[in-house]
Amino acid sequence: MKYCKKCVMPDTRPGIMFDQNGVCCACNHYDMRKDVDYDARFKEFEALCNKYRGMNGENGYDCAVAVSGGKDSHYQVHMLKEVMGMNPILYTVEDNFPMTDAGKHNLQNISETFGCTIISCKPDIRTQKTIMRKTFEKYGKPTWIIDRLLYTYPLHMALKFNTPLLCYGENVSYEYGGVDDVETYSAKEQINNGVAIGIPLEELIGEGVTEKELQLTLAPEPEQLEQLDVFYLSYFMEWNSYRNYQFAKSRGFHDLSHEWDRSHHVENFDQIDSPAYLVHSWMKYPKFGHASATDYCSRAIRYGLMTRDAAIELVNKRDHDLDSRSVADFCKFLGYSDTEFWSIIDSFYNRDIFEKDDIGRWVLKNPLTQSS
């Protein structure tokens, strides 16, 4: 494993690229912001909104936002409703897991604070559990069905409610490094990224699951997708997830302060809705040698909020240590014993980058150090 010389991201992150100086593409993209005319970009955003404003009549919805209730969702809704004067309807997917108090509050807060209707998709629990077990045990992607719905469900609803202007937050591949990290305002191609694809439909069918139960996970037909104008807000302005957090707090967003200190995270404000969901995002660690601590320390370095030395210390302390509350909620939901759960996790450790130490712990062969 090699690590970015500016942040702490390893070259094992799928799709990430390093330049000849050992700097990752996410850091280079961040540095390139100084050459972007964001005033001109904002005018493009105004023109985009003007195209659709009032399209369904004076009181009709004229745009939509895919939301979770999180910090970025608060900022997205603010920009469309309060800054641009649009009338958005919000689409969300609930994962059926036990929620944190903060998660419950925030989804209600975004509706109450901004005066917006939220239409929620709660997957049928029987199908969700069946698919989760399959995708966890074979692919190490336990919440694939939820993540897939996050990309497809808002598309279906945008067609149904005639709100073709559909907002997503950031272009994850471009902002943080990944496959197809092209800077573009169009978010249509995100349904083809590594999170949302890679599992054949025929593998999901069986054990009581038919194609009928999976209809919402299928993307609209190409000719239907062409009717939509799906965009990344991050294209039009300098995206900063920490700044979004500060804004969201000013509008009633709650973080996890005084509720839960997650052992494998270094912050308390992102992906805070349900502990069980975090097993999925942590699965990057056994497969690729990095997880949420690496992700957020890398962002903090780019934002000027943390030194690389401080990040190294936090990553080494936190990244590997999947929180016990996440494990407990996950196992209870799917009916795994702790032994079954950790046996499955053990099977996903990448032997090319991990080895076991003298006391049986998985450790990186090339750990992150100050000289990395």
Image (tube, grey):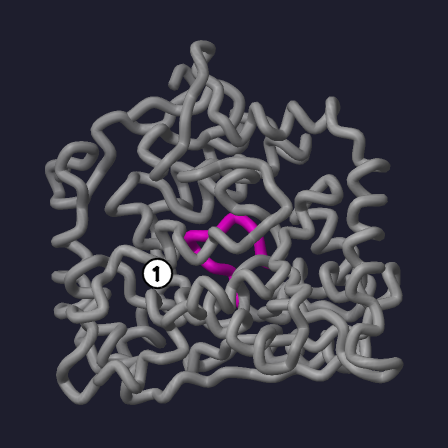
On-image quarter of the N terminus? top left
Tally of numbered discs = 1
- Does residue 338 appear in the picture of this structure? no
Which range of residues does the magenta coloring cover? 260-268
Circle 1 packing at 10 Å, graded few (<14), some (14-19), many (20+), is some
Q: Residue 133 in the image: x percent, y percent?
A: 21, 73
Compared to residue 179, the image places residue 272 above or below, namely below
- Where does the image place residue 315, in percent across and percent down from the top left? 43, 38
Q: Position of residue 115 (x, y in %)?
A: 81, 80
Can the viewer see residue 298? yes
Side (left or right) of 52 relative to 343: right
Instruction: Indicate whether residue 264 is drawn in magenta.
Output: yes
11 displayed left or right of 29: left
Q: Does the magenta stretch mainly form a helix, a strand or a loop?
A: loop
* Residue at the image point whose x is 55% and y is 72% from the top: 154
- Taking the view exactly as shown, the residue that stands out farthest to the top is 20
The answer to which image quadrant residue 230 occupies is bottom right
Quadrant for residue 58, please give it.
bottom right
Q: Is residue 334 above or below residue 173?
A: below
Q: Secondary structure at mark 1?
A: helix
Residue that extends furthest to the front in the rendered view of this protein = 223
Task: Please tell me which residue lies in front, 317 or 187.
Answer: 187
Looking at the figure, which quarter contains the C terminus? top left
Q: Residue at x 46, y 11 (%)?
A: 21
Find out whether residue 249 is within the magenta segment: no
Look at label 1 and name its amino acid: His
Residue 122 or 213: which is nearer the viewer? Answer: 213
Which residue is pictured at 63% across the width and 51% down the height?
A: 232
Left or right of 155, for residue 143: left
Tell me the residue that label 1 is attached to: 280
Q: Is residue 133 above or below residue 206?
A: above
